Amino acid sequence: MTNDSRQNDLYTLMSVDDEPIVHDMVARILERSRLPISICAAALSGEEALQLAEATRPDICLLDIHMGGMDGLELADRLKRMSDYTPSLIYLTAYDRFEYARQAIRLGAEEYLLKPIRREELLDALSRAVERLQAERLENLEKEHMQRSLEKVLPALAVQDEPRTRRTASMVREVRDYVDQHFAEKLSLDLMAERFHLSPGYLGSLFKSETGLAFRAYLRSIRIARAKSLMADQKLNLTEIAHAVGYEDINYFSQAFMEETGVRPSEYRGAGRRWAR
């Protein structure tokens, strides 16, 4: 594979270590590998790495932990705070300490390697990072495809000159239809917003303005209405009914039922309502 052909699909890596020899070793290992990774930056300190990360946006960061000034753990925390950017983090350190490993994992470390550098171990870790990045890229492409498909299903969203009220009604109707069919599944405003490629706040506002109900209240009403219907089946206990309408916790189901009907499920069923004859 020529260098020119590799440049078309490269992932970038920033090496962060206060020992220049480490940068040289990483560069030599990558140069002799067939991984689609190029080094975009090499930093000798956490402070320098943070500046370079903002400028180069590497896909992968290979971090030493123990450095003067800002160490690798603090650097990872700072990188996480860059709201629109989250690189793949691989730690390379001479310190085999559980506390370091635990902090690294908490900060999103995907690999934790010990020095001295072992060529095969490093290449295996980088290969896994590439696989994760490729999976994320594929997921983003699928989301773009879903967006195009959604615009075909909901042409009102793509037609800019159509009245806004009709676009809103069409969107909310699609959301309601989905909830009506999938109420027993794990649903939330955040998940629905992601599915329809909107922000949760915007979708929540549209939904309430169109239906008069908050999304959570609408979902609860659908689930509890179905639960009341299932109570006619004397073979089903309340736990089974709760699970059937999307509640994994019987206490949460009982609370939702009371909010919706004013009585607890046991009281509703005990009154003899909706029992099969």
Image (cartoon, rainbow, N blue to C red):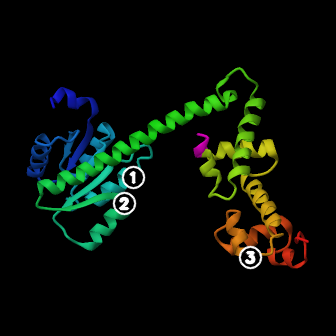
Q: Please tell me whether mark 3 sits on a helix, a strand or a loop.
A: loop
- The first of marks 3 and 2 along the sequence is 2
Q: What is the crowding at mark 3: few (fewer than 14 residues within 10 Å), some, or many (at least 20)?
A: few
Q: Quadrant of residue 228?
A: bottom right
Amino acid identity at mark 3: Asn
Please give the residue where the numbered disc 1 appears in the rendered image.
80
Question: Which of pointers 1 and 3 indicates the residue nearer the eye?
Answer: 3
Depth check: give the residue in front, 45 or 120.
120
In primary-sequence order, the first of circles 2 and 1 is 1
> x, y (%) of residue 260?
82, 64
- Asked whether disc 2 touches disc 1, contact meaning CB atoms under 8 Å apart, the reply is yes
Residue 198 belongs to magenta span: yes
Residue 8 percent across, percent down from the top left: 26, 29
Q: Residue at x 67, y 63 (%)?
A: 246
Identify the residue under disc 2: 107
When the figure is inspected, residue 161 is found, relative to residue 32, above or below; the finding is above
